[in-house]
Image: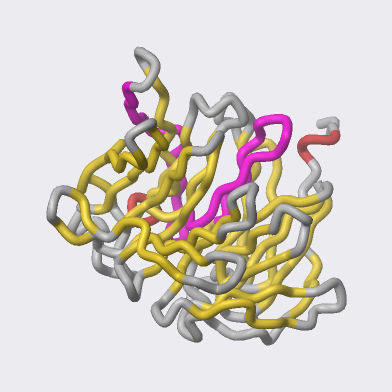
Amino acid sequence: MSHGHHSHNQKATTFVSGIGNDLCSPFFSPNGKLHAIRQNAGSVITIDNVGNTQVICSTGGQPSGAVYTSDGVLYVSDFGHSAVVSVQPDGQQDLVVGVYEDKPLKGPHSIHISKGDIFFTDSGSFGETGLHNRSGSLFTISSSPSGQILKPLALETLAYPSGIAVSHDGKFIYVAEMMANRVLRFFQQPSGVFHASVFYQFSGGVGPSALVLDALGNLYVGLYDVKESASEGVVHVLSPAGKITSHITTTGPEISGLAISDGQLYITEKSTGSVQKAKL
């Protein structure tokens, strides 16, 4: 069997470890600086190229995901506040959304911005939604002339929805439905009306926690498992057609986030408190 470029399996290398077992959700600022989240510490941190960390803000809650707008405002999905909050460059923190139709959110998990629209999953903290209670949601906040509009793309039907990725043209939204051990893909038909189907059903482990797309449309899926079950973790690479083309193994199975920058995949793993890297 000939191994082309795409079927190249590799082992991630540790970039920095021992940060803490609450490390998750790596992301990059507009100027390319690596950030991540310390969930229990309540902080968003930067990590420099020799692995030193610095707290840039604390939400006073339990942040789970974060993303920058192009003008440098940080949007944070936060379990502790059961809300999405924004943090201005000067540190001012505001509530963006905490309720939908007078019902409090459970706890936003992951957040993503695409073409000015914000997408977030609402899972609640671990165990709140799952196979026993498929009541997680996917929401979008879109900007309109009359202000920001919150609308559900999946309302209280998901078993712990976590990571999100949006295709570069904005037409497809991928969601890691962790406790159902699968990735969903939302498509539009007609435009603006969303439907979901199962893009990939996994088996083994707990389920997918984190997603990121590369420039070619390949979807990287970080699977979460408990350290009692496995010593290594795996990130599967799915082609745009939904076939596994390769995988990347990690030290420790508790994968809690993925990000891509400059031809490198960055992976956070909780049991080692590490950021790991793999070349794309």
Q: Does the magenta stretch include residue 214?
A: yes
In this rendering, would 139 be left or right of 73? left
Q: How is the image coloured?
A: secondary structure
Q: Which image quarter holds the N terminus?
A: top right
Quarter of the figure with residue 105: bottom left
Can residue 159 be seen in the rendering of this structure?
Answer: yes
| Main SS of residues in magenta | strand
| Above or below, 72 relative to 63 | above
- Identify which residue, 180 or 110, lies in the foreground: 110
Q: Is residue 64 magenta?
A: no
Quarter of the figure with residue 77: bottom left
**What's drawn in magenta, residue-wise?**
193-222
Residue at 27 percent across and 40 percent down: it is 152
Residue at 65 percent across and 42 percent down: it is 237
Q: Where is residue 239 in the image (x, y as percent from the top left)?
A: 64, 31
- Identify which residue, 230 or 220, lies in the foreground: 220
Can residue 181 be seen in the rendering of this structure?
Answer: no
In this rendering, would 202 be left or right of 102? right
- Identify which residue, 162 or 14, lies in the foreground: 162
| Above or below, 57 relative to 214 | below
| Above or below, 197 relative to 13 | above
Q: How many labels does the image show?
A: 0
Q: Position of residue 119 (x, y in %)?
A: 43, 44
Residue at 69 percent across and 58 percent down: it is 28
**Residue farthest toward the left in the current orientation of the protein:** 102
| Above or below, 55 relative to 137 | below
Q: Position of residue 38 (x, y in %)?
A: 55, 78
Residue at 58 percent across and 74 percent down: it is 44
